[in-house]
Amino acid sequence: MRPTPPSPRAVLGDIPAYVPKPPRPPATGTSHRLYLNENPYPPLPSALARISWAAAQTNLYPGIFPERLTDAVARKLDVPLEHVLTGPGSVGIYQQIGQAMLSPGDEVVYAWPSFEAFPIVVRMAGAVPVEVPLSDETHDLEAMAAALTPRTTMVLLCEPNNPTGTAVGAAELKRFLDRVPSHVLVVLDEAYFEFSRSPDAPDGVELHRDRPNLVVLRTFSKAYGLAGLRVGYGVAHPEIAAALRKCAVPCGVSRIAEEAALAALDAEDELFEQVERVIGERERLRAALGEQGWVLPPSETNFLWLPLGERSVPVAAELERGGLLVRCFPGTGLRITVGSPAANDQLIAALAGLTSAR
Ligand SMILES: Cc1ncc(COP(=O)(O)O)c(C=O)c1O
């Protein structure tokens, strides 16, 4: 008889895989990765130079925390050093949040559909997800406030929202934050902050200054184009930041990632020009698809959302056959990254041919 292998924790049985089924490129022809909200531009030469300089020191451990990057982020945001934390991508910081701040049975309120990491972080801690449906593809902050109970210890907000690309206004968000009791931690994920052009967009870092229960997460993966190096950061009041640091993987941000992020901060002007181009392409795509009869909410991100319901799977399959790899949420919609102009042209042409699915 084979010996029984050790069992993982029972909660893992309920945890969804992060991306259930990545789209598959066709056997022939080019394909475009439009399913992970990646930046279409390759790293800048200045970042590549610092990456290779750091790579030459790979026999050495990096610092326990990336101190120079922490310092640069604190100066950029004009916040005290002890408010800044870093992690191997912002998803790394989510794991720290789950370990440091959640206990079994805690209720965690978040909108749905929203960032796919939310149910994973919550269930991993043995906490209880309280999912509040979006309204008009946007966070329903009224309903989220109504979902708070004495057992709520955390609220997770993704603004602008992944996967719908929509955003709430600053005044509405402030009103919501004022209704959350001070002992409840609010995590505001601003992964797409740099892509927002709404005049009414909230700025989590400003909001955090007089709200000790607010943690803001941002990343170098999207606007700064460093998804492959895994580096994100957060801003929190010192007691929370110190607790999260205790749960960080030591040396979790590599020297290569730190140097590349420092180079990206030095080259913000150039990178933000690329962001402008992505925003220009986003609006071009949205207008072209709107003219074809597709209904899409406005986006403040580097992706668009097609709420196709039951048509999502067949439309995604058709796009996949043509080499356009999009993220399909079966029964709900398609999330499509704004790609290179060539990829976007191909998408416009492919969707023009799918007249019966609109
Ligand atoms: C809302 C949101 N937060 C965080 C991330 C992941 O960021 P990182 O690459 O910094 O882990 C993503 C990636 O798609 C995202 O959509």
Image: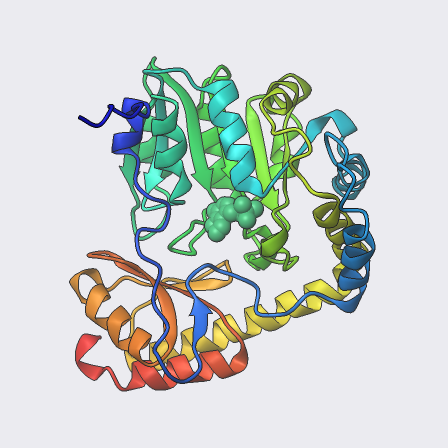
The quarter of the picture where the N terminus appears is: top left
Q: Please tell me which residue lies in front, 108 or 64.
A: 64
| Residue 211: % across, % down | 60, 24
Residue at image position (58%, 51%) is 193
- Residue at 30%, 45% (x, y): give it: 134
Residue 21 shown left or right of residue 213 in the figure: left
Residue 12 picture location, percent across and down: 31, 30
Residue found at x 38% / y 55%: 164
Q: Is residue 356 above or below residue 66?
A: below
In this rendering, the answer to whether 335 lies above or below 289 is above
State the count of labels. Answer: 0
Task: Judge by depth and name the residue closer to the eye, 190 or 41.
Answer: 41
* Percent of width and height locating residue 217: 58, 39
Can you say which quadrant of the picture contains the C terminus? Answer: bottom left
Horizontal side, residue 321 vs residue 299: left or right:
left
Q: Is residue 160 visible?
A: no
Is there any visible trace of residue 121 in the rendered image?
A: yes
Query: Is 10 placed left or right of 275 in the picture?
Result: left
Of all residues, the one furthest to the front in this rendering is 1
Image check: 44 left or right of 204?
right
Task: Name the residue rendered at 32%, 46% in the picture.
Answer: 113
Residue toward you, 147 or 277: 277
Residue 112, placed above or below residue 320: above
